[in-house]
Amino acid sequence: MIFDLEKKRYKIEEFVGPIHWGDWESFSNLKRVGIFKNNHDFYELNIWFLNNKHFTFDVFTEYEDVLAEAHYVAEVLELQIMDASDPRNPRILDTIQE
């Protein structure tokens, strides 16, 4: 998956050897940016759509790194951030870096 945050679009790119193909699609019905900790202790930065589908934007080993990227993505896409890295205590973050 390739993201173009400036133009608010993404592309699922397929390839076989040197041949690449895929069409750009606009982000629509975006809901929020989410931070989650997976079963392998990595932090995932996801972009969620209103229909509860999501794309994993990137994966990080350090919380500070995923938090900084989440703030950047949320600012560009004008979305709020849901920090669910602790699933027992999810919270909405201010888009201004805390």
Image (spheres, rainbow, N blue to C red):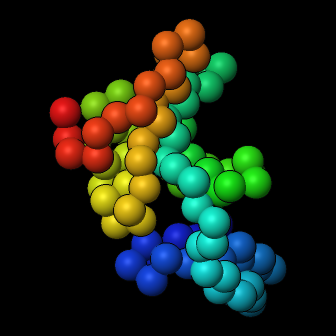
- Residue drawn at x 66%, y 82% as measured from the top left: 25
Quadrant location of the N terminus? bottom right
The x, y position of residue 93, in whole percent, is 34, 34
Q: Is residue 88 above or below residue 70?
A: above
At 38% from the left and 62% from the top, the residue drawn is 78
Residue 82 seen anywhere in this rendered image of the structure = yes
- Taking depth in this image into account, of 84 and 16 the one nearest to the observer is 84
Classify 37 as above or below 69: above
Point 63% across, 72% down: residue:
28
Above/below status of 9 relative to 48: below
> What residue occupies the far right of the structure in this picture?
16
Question: Percent x, y for residue 11?
Answer: 65, 77
Q: In the drawing, does residue 82 fall left or right of residue 26?
A: left
Who's the residue at 71% across and 73% down the image?
A: 12
Q: Nearer the viewer, residue 89 or 55?
A: 89
- Which residue is situated farthest in the top direction here? 88
Q: Which image quarter: residue 96?
A: top left
Measuring from the top left, give residue 30's x and y in whole percent.
58, 61
The answer to whether residue 6 is above or below residue 35 is below
* Quadrant for the C terminus in the image: top left
Q: Quadrant of residue 51?
A: bottom right
Residue 43 visible within the image: no
Number of marks present in the image shown:
0
